[in-house]
Image (cartoon, rainbow, N blue to C red):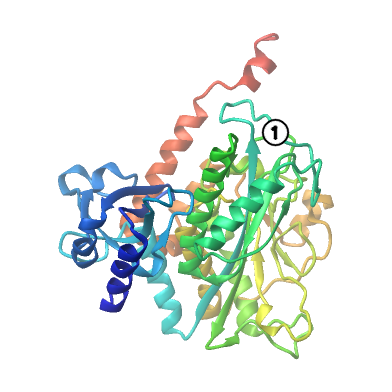
Amino acid sequence: MSDKGKEWVLKECKEKGVEFIRLWFTDILGTMKSFAITVEELEGALDEGMGFDGSSITGYQDIQESDMIAMPDPATFTLLPWRSKDKPVAKMFCDILTPDGEPYPGDPRYILKRMLKKAADKGYTFYVGPELEYFYFKDSSPSTEVLDYGGYFDLTPLDVASELRRETILVLKEMGIPVEYSHHEVAYSQHEIDLRYADALTMADAAMTYRLVVKEIAHQNGVYATFMPKPIFGQNGSGMHTHQSLFVGDKNAFFDPDDPAHLSPIAKYYIAGLLKHAKETCAILAQWVNSYKRLVPGFEAPVYIAWSQRNRSALVRVPLYKPGKESATRVELRNPDPACNPYLAFAVMLASGLRGIEEKYELPPEMTENLYELTEEERKARGIESLPPSLGEAIAITEQSELVRETLGEHAFQRFVWNKKKEWDEFRIQVTEYELRRYLPVL
């Protein structure tokens, strides 16, 4: 940590009259964790970090080795705009360290940093632009009562949440997070705010902040926001389509002016890596039981492992090139959902793409047909495989993945797999309302 960064944070707190600083980090599942310190403790925290009990954080330490240190990152310092202006509250994201000052291998932020360093050692900077969709409901009860019956791009009077989105965007901008655009999505009461692309670490921090801000503004307005992937049966679920590219210096490594699709060999190897490792990374990108209620045919969610330039039924889409926009050449991965851990998600996406580049995977032919309309035999004839249909099957594949194990590291990998197996076991023994309605009257 640079002395300049520390001095700037201390100066900001003094000038703005900050009384409390919230220290943010995430557990292995991507749940935001936080504790507050007073401004009097700030200098010491910036120098030495703040200790806490890691055994109480999902996926962290066992109780006999529970001491952890949260080291604030001054580059992530911002005020929380929704708190009192009279006694401002600030926040910083933290890197988690062991008691001897080493990076903690179970810290998702460190896992992403480690993967980004691998890319940097090859000369690449990894940029991402996720599209996080979510729902507004009238309250947090299981009724999922919607605020509107609007559809894609609908405006007032159907889109009554426009003001909520506007307020959310203003808060994000005040926190230094640029927004490209926002709109009503396809499903009732479903919305999307797209963050402007950034390097993957900055974006992972921004995605965590975005999820919190959306919920905070909704709460202040007496409604409930959720990033649950599929809260309403029969409606589209929420995705986190993630646009990604690699740069070498200021040049986009994915662009080739002479290729018909304007894709460089690097881009093609990268896409091939995303496709080849799609099954084994699926449990990271769609990590909940409910995630697989979204990943079904017919709701604009990708199920089939293929790529295309225009076809939104494919797992990977390549947005069409616009002349003069070489830097915008990118690929879009469509199976992540907004309830994933963005640090781990971006790490395994990058790992898959880099593996494709390292081993020069061959890119399969582009699929221009609507994959939902093909028969199973037709898809099989074209060599098109499917994503795992359930969390149980996804985690069984991930458990055998050398790539995911290497990316997460043994410590985080074992804890993630254990947690997801536990979730699947808890789910599969439930007796659901569907079963009671379907079987109780007749069996």
Residue at 50% x, 59% y: name it: 345
Q: Please indicate whether residue 368 sits to the left or right of residue 169 in the image.
A: right
Q: Residue 232 versus residue 47: which sits nearer the camera?
A: 47
Q: Please indicate whether residue 426 sits to the left or right of residue 17 in the image.
A: right
Q: Residue 11 versus residue 415: which sits nearer the camera?
A: 11
Evaluate whether residue 336 shows in this view. Answer: no
Residue at 38% x, 70% y: name it: 75
Residue 76 to residue 136: above or below: below
Image quarter where the N terminus lies is bottom left
Query: Where residue 266 sits in the image (x, y, percent)?
Result: 60, 82
Q: Residue 157 versus residue 249: which sits nearer the camera?
A: 157
Query: Where residue 202 sits in the image (x, y, percent)?
Result: 47, 68
Residue at 65% x, 78% y: name it: 268
| Residue 107 image-quadrant placement | bottom left
Q: Amino acid at mark 1?
A: Val
| Residue 159 image-quadrant placement | top right
Evaluate whether residue 3 shows in this view. Answer: yes
Q: Label 1 crowding class (10 Å Cα cut-off): few <14, some 14-19, many 20+?
A: some
